[in-house]
Image (cartoon, rainbow, N blue to C red):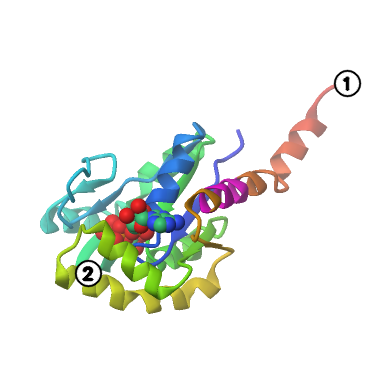
Amino acid sequence: MRKGKLFVVSGPSGVGKGSICSEVIKGDENINFSVSVTTRLPRAGEIEGIHYFFRKKEEFENLISENSFLEYAKVFDNYYGTLKDYVFEKLDKGENIILDIDTQGALNVKANYSEAILVFILPPSLDELKSRLMNRATENESELKKRINGARAEIKKAINYDYIIINDDLNKAICDLKTIIYVEKLKTDKKVIENILEEEI
Ligand SMILES: Nc1nc2c(ncn2[C@@H]2O[C@H](COP(=O)(O)OP(=O)(O)O)[C@@H](O)[C@H]2O)c(=O)[nH]1
Ligand SMILES: Nc1ncnc2c1ncn2[C@@H]1O[C@H](COP(=O)(O)OP(=O)(O)O)[C@@H](O)[C@H]1O
């Protein structure tokens, strides 16, 4: 069976990664979201097992020692990690998967799994990014500062990505990510060629 494709989406906090990924997944039953484990507290409206698996620091550290993560990183003073089994079970079944993870995690995934396709979401400007974060109103003053201060460092890493999407118009950005997924699915697959050549005629 043809293996699924692994897409990694990154971008500064507040750029719209969550908004874009959730719409793309809603419209395509063959693409799944990789639910990460985090030690950060849930925001209002966030659901265990849908947005994240929310765990205590000790529980997260147990998962690290059990080698459960494909990658993990400390972001804004909390741990975040991608579960290895969660991702590879889906890929082995031929399902595509999207990871919404930071640039440290993304580059670690690429180093261990070179087939990963990296997509970076850029804001139209830093000023617009700041106002999106402020309007989202999910963080207190100090959390907000950490996110704004971290934006430049994340954006500097965009140069290592396969694709860049500018999230100015949300619908266009959703369409751009869908197009990337579509195009990547059309890329040469040796297995498909081998299968057809093995056919008896
Ligand atoms: N390395 C890594 N980063 C993650 C993971 N899950 C989420 N993140 C990143 O952690 C950062 C903070 O996420 P979150 O707390 O949801 O805040 P938001 O980006 O402001 O919505 C974002 O850059 C996410 O992409 C993960 O499993 N691994
Ligand atoms: N293109 C856009 N134009 C205006 N607001 C947007 C756009 N995309 C997302 N937003 C808003 O910006 C805020 C941050 O988006 P979110 O998806 O939470 O970002 P991230 O997951 O990257 O932190 C949300 O309030 C969202 O509704």
Quick one: label 1 or label 2, which is nearer the N terminus?
2
Question: In the image as oriented, which residue stretches furthest toward the right?
Answer: 201
Q: Main secondary structure of the magenta part?
A: helix
Query: Is residue 76 visible to us here?
Result: yes
Q: Position of residue 14 (x, y in %)?
A: 34, 62
Residue 6 is inside the magenta segment? no
User: Left or right: 38 with respect to 179?
Assistant: left
Type of amino acid at the residue the image marks with label 2: Leu
From the image, tell me which residue sits under label 2: 144
From the image, tell me which residue sits under label 1: 201
Rendering quarter of residue 23: top left
Instruction: Identify the magenta region.
Output: 173-181
Q: Nearer the viewer, residue 41 or 149?
A: 149
Q: Which residue: 18% across, 55% down?
A: 60
Q: Nearer the viewer, residue 62 or 120?
A: 120
Q: Secondary structure at mark 2?
A: helix
Type of amino acid at the residue the image marks with label 1: Ile
User: Left or right: 140 with respect to 93?
Assistant: left
